[in-house]
Image: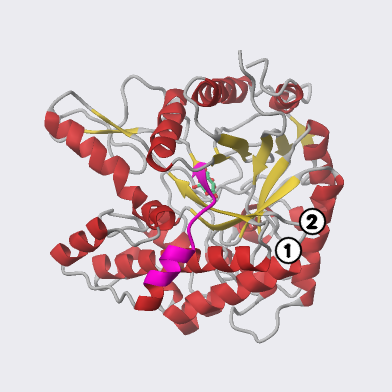
Amino acid sequence: MAELAKDFFWGGSIAAHQLEGAYQEGGKGLNTMDLFTGGAYGRPRQITEELQADTYYPSHQAIDFYHRYQEDIQMFGDMGFRALRISIDWSRIFPRGDEEEPSREGLDYYHKVIDELRKHKIEPIVTLFHFELPVGIVRNYNSWLSRETIDLYLKFVETVVGEYKGKVNYWVTFNEMNHIDPQTEVSDLFTYILAGLEYSKMQDKKQTLAVLGYHMTLASVKAAKMIRKIDAGNQVGCVFGLTPYYPKTCRPEDMLLSFQDTIRDFYQIDAMVWGEFPKYKMFEYQREGISLEITEADRVAFREGTLDFIGLNYYASAVSSAVKEEGAQEAMFGGELNPYLEKSDWGWTIDPIGLRYLMNFVYRKYQKPIIICENGLGAADEVSETGEIRDDYRIDYLGKHLGQLKKAVLEDGVECFGYLMWAPIDLVSATTGEMKKRYGFIYVDKHDDGSGDLSRKPKASYYWYKEMIASNGENL
Ligand code: BGP
């Protein structure tokens, strides 16, 4: 049987606000995630306008990667990682978002992280926006609702891409902007993490979401052109968090709805791959009374800023049912739960075949190289009395998903150049703010009540993934 490429990017994915901590060190400004409190499954995180005393903000210390990156990267290196997706926190480089000059301290910090990765022969894949939006940009420029924010983002992009030229070859413009869409009844969660704005407080919701989504898409295509201009060897991608929807029955209405639910999150990818903001989306906006300002310069930007690769974050599938039946259970982020599938303790469906389906769907649509940028299982791991962490359920989850990835590549011909597991080390959950929802191969002694000595320890899955990489997926 054919094999995966010898240089397949096995590795993991992390995001600054979920693990760095040190929120007031190195000249860092406040970003929106620093104002997001802890929550739990069924208890949403709260957004505070200012920092409040006696309130727990998980990002402030997180797992202190800021000071411990050497130890952590050493462990990733020992596992044989070939790539690590990190994010650069915008508020470490431009603390308020609109300074004339970037912070030297911030730039130097990421030099150290990137150098450390290179030392261990780990390819850095750098995300330029993984929800770390300087608070000053929300307060003074109305977040992504203004075009000034696009310019500030481009200045940040130009600064960091220029700074790390020759050291970083893979850039990701945005993480999961697709959660912004006027058709989606989004919660405060997604509009807050992407734009620092609360959905429930928006005046004209559909119009606001459309403008946010459009401006972020435009920022991405402009950045893509800029990144390649700085170094023609740079590869530019954008990462999308996608959910395949299955029809509940073969009723044509269910089939149509499942298509609509799945494809809803694709308009930005269409724009970034086809080089034009989609006509069908403009048609929808017209029908909905939404107006967008699209200039001639925008049109040129779309044509010139297409993607080199597509990053996929995949966690779960869902079910579309045109007829609401009694007893049907709602899935976490839309649609219904699939009665044929198990779910995690946080209610996320576990569907390995969904990964193969999604990879095929995306590849057949665009025929662009794909990289899996996130996939993993959040679970409440326990340390046994003898000090081990036996996360066999995670090994089972990852083994099954990787088995499907292999089929997508080797049987279906999907061009996929890497798998970056979320998250190789326990860190703060984006949706709930918990430490209890652990994803890592590496256990971190940190708990939601603030206790723990932050020590690191390999789990059973650590050794499993290491062996899997050594065999280049042979043993799956
Ligand atoms: C994705 C985000 C990540 C990550 C992941 C898991 O949407 O890109 O930042 O957190 O979801 O979600 P959670 O941490 O809420 O379990």
Q: Position of residue 457 (x, y in %)?
A: 78, 34
Inspect the image, locate mark 1, and give the three-letter code of the amino acid beneath it.
Answer: Ala
Q: Which residue is mark 2?
A: 113
Which of the 4 image quadrants contains residue 392?
Answer: top right
Residue type (three-letter) at the residue carrying disc 2: Val
Residue 64 position, x and y percent, is 74, 54
Question: Which of the 4 image quarters holds residue 395?
Answer: top right
Callout 2 crowding tier (Cα within 10 Å): few <14, some 14–19, many ≥20 = some
302 shown above or below 120: below
The verdict on residue 307 being magenta is: yes
Q: How is the image coloured?
A: secondary structure
* 1 or 2: tag closer to the N-terminus: 1
Compared with 462, 44 (above or below) is below
In depth, the one of 436 and 294 nearer the eye is 294
Q: Quadrant of the C terminus?
A: top right
**Residue shown at 62%/36% (left/top)?**
418
Q: Which residues are magenta?
A: 299-312
The residue that disc 1 covers is 22
Residue 377: give its label: none
**Which residue is painted at 28% across and 53% down in the image?**
184
Q: Is residue 87 magenta?
A: no
Residue 236: horizontal and vertical position, in percent? Answer: 58, 55
Q: Could you tell me which residue is drawn at 62 percent across and 39 percent down?
A: 420
In this rendering, is residue 34 above or below 452? below
Mark 1 → mark 2, Cα distance in angstroms: 15 Å
Q: Residues within 10 Å of mark 1 (few under 14, many from 20)?
A: some
Q: Is label 1 in a helix, a strand or a loop?
A: loop
Q: Secondary structure at mark 2?
A: helix
